[in-house]
Image (cartoon, rainbow, N blue to C red):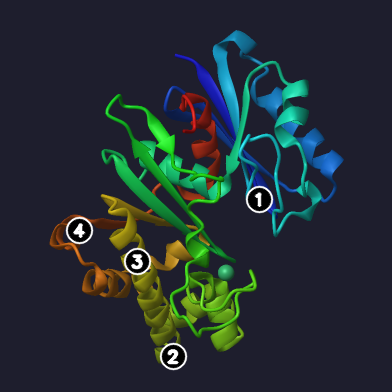
Amino acid sequence: MRYSLGVDIGASKISFALLKGKHCISKDKISTPKKQKDIIEAISNIISRITRHISSQQIKGIGVGVPGPIDKEKESVLNPPNLKALFKFPLKKVLQKKLSFEVKIENDANCFVLGEAVIGAGKGFRKVIGLTLGSGVGGGIVFRTARNQWKIYTGAFGGAGEFGHMTIKFDGLKCSCGNFGCLEAYASAKFFERKSKYSPKEIENQARKGNKKAIALYREFGKNLGIGIANLVNVLDPEVVVIGGSISKASQLFLKETKKEAKKRILSPYSKRFVKIKIAKLGDFSGAIGAALLPEIQNYD
Ligand SMILES: [Zn+2]
């Protein structure tokens, strides 16, 4: 069985996972350096450390998740909103030069959904969508073909799966993208910060102590998310919707509301009855594990 490596480049942390087949056998994380040069050096150092006892013939490839859109040819990062150091950076080319095995790059939310679909909360299903709830809302669409190959649906121009920027309120609040009423303004950390001046974690702690306002805020958040999920189910008809990201750890406080609101708004009686809304299983390393599965994917179309 061959090995594959996954790297998830986040704004504050870079996570790594080494997979043997579909089993994660080693993982690690470091703080994200500020400069482009240092990011590349840190990644190549940790890769050589993790793989020092494995010959390059045994390594199938490396997948890299990046926080932002990438161009259709999968060669470079376009405009990562939280990681300016990689703006228009030809990441694949640069890493490929340093490493002796194949490199693939992909949007980090797509990596998250791929990881959860193949070995996480979406395991056993064929049509999987996922959302990451944190400082923003990320999304991805993956499916398994009749030939048992996993694919990421990236759309005609590579922009598919931007669930955070789906309008859920046509005259709603201004979003960081410039549009109004996006899901991200109502179902990410921004919602809590705007409504309370506290972070989701702080509100979670207050809610767990029984603070009624905090509990109500999480319920409202859950309802907003449910509206977004109903739209996605009505358009994409997945078997399962996987919810991850830092805020998903507080699912006890919002998931019931999310399911209730989503079911109310889903049209198809089959989807209403059978679609699953589940919390991610792979934890903080789901992005890196998903990235490590990229070399398994045959092609993107
Ligand atoms: Zn937006």
Residue ID for mark 4: 271
Depth check: give the residue in front, 167 or 183: 167
Task: Measure how far apart labels 4 and 2 are at the Cα level.
Answer: 33 Å
Q: What's under tag 2, amino acid-wise? A: Lys
Q: CA distance from mark 3 to mark 2?
A: 28 Å
Between 211 and 121, the residue placed more toward the observer is 121
Please report whichever mark, 4 or 2, sits nearer to the chain's N-terminal start. 2
What amino acid does circle 4 point to? Ser
- The secondary element bearing badge 1 is classed as loop
- Cα–Cα gap, marks 1 and 3: 28 Å
Quick check: can you spot residue 284?
yes
Which is more N-terminal, label 4 or label 1? Answer: 1
For the point 64% across and 20% down, the residue is 51
- Point out the tag, 1 or 2, that comes first from the N-terminus: 1
Image location (x, y in percent) of residue 257: 30, 75
Q: Earlier in the sequence, mark 3 or mark 2?
A: 2
Residue under numbered circle 2 = 213
Which residue carries the number 3 mark? 231
What residue lies at 49% left-to-right and 33% top-to-bottom?
300
Pointers 3 and 2 in contact (CB under 8 A)?
Answer: no
Q: Whole-percent x and y of residue 197?
A: 61, 85
Some atom of ligand 1 lies within 8 Å of the CB belonging to the residue at label 3? no
How many circles with numbers are drawn on the protein? 4
Depth order, front residue of 113/166: 166
Q: Which mark is residue 10?
A: 1
Q: Which badge, 1 or 3, comes first in the chain's sequence?
A: 1
